Image: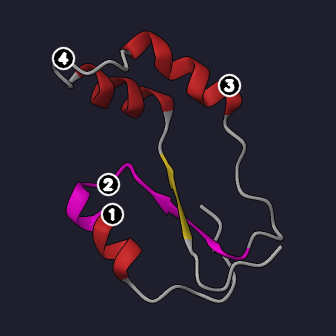
Amino acid sequence: REARAVQFVCLVVDEPTARRRVGARAGHFFGVPMVAGQFTSFEPPQPDELDVVVVDARSDLATVLATIDAPWPAVRPQP
């Protein structure tokens, strides 16, 4: 599998941070009780998926966006 023109970003965050952020969303359909299921079914990128960069999404939005916008390494870094 190879997608030269497509790049993927995997935003990684811990469950407590995800719960806090989801809980802060007013009126959003995705509620805090749904967060645990996302962590249960999450499948991290595999070593052969070189078109994926893993980004620590616990930082503030500006830092996350700067990381995504930076030049990507040839091989995906480990979180």
Q: Is residue 37 above or below residue 1?
A: above
| Of the image marks 1 and 4, the number of the one nearer the N terminus | 4
> Left or right of 51: which side holds 8?
left
Of the image marks 2 and 4, the number of the one nearer the N terminus: 4
N-terminal of the pair, mark 3 or mark 4, is 4
Q: Disc 3 to disc 4, how far (Cα)? A: 24 Å
Q: Are marks 1 and 4 in contact (CB under 8 Å)?
A: no
> Which sits in the foreground, 46 or 60?
46
- According to the picture, the residue beneath numbered tag 2 turns out to be 59
> Which label is found at residue 2?
none
Q: Nearer the viewer, mark 3 or mark 2?
A: 3
Residue 64 is marked as: 1
Q: Which mark is residue 27?
A: 4
- Nearer the observer, disc 2 or disc 4? 4
Residue type (three-letter) at the residue carrying disc 4: Gly
Horizontal side of residue 52 vs 66, given as left or right = right
**Label 4: few (<14), some (14–19) or many (≥20) C-alpha neighbours in 10 Å:** few
Q: Up-down: is 76 above or below 37?
A: below
Give the magenta part as a residue range.
50-63
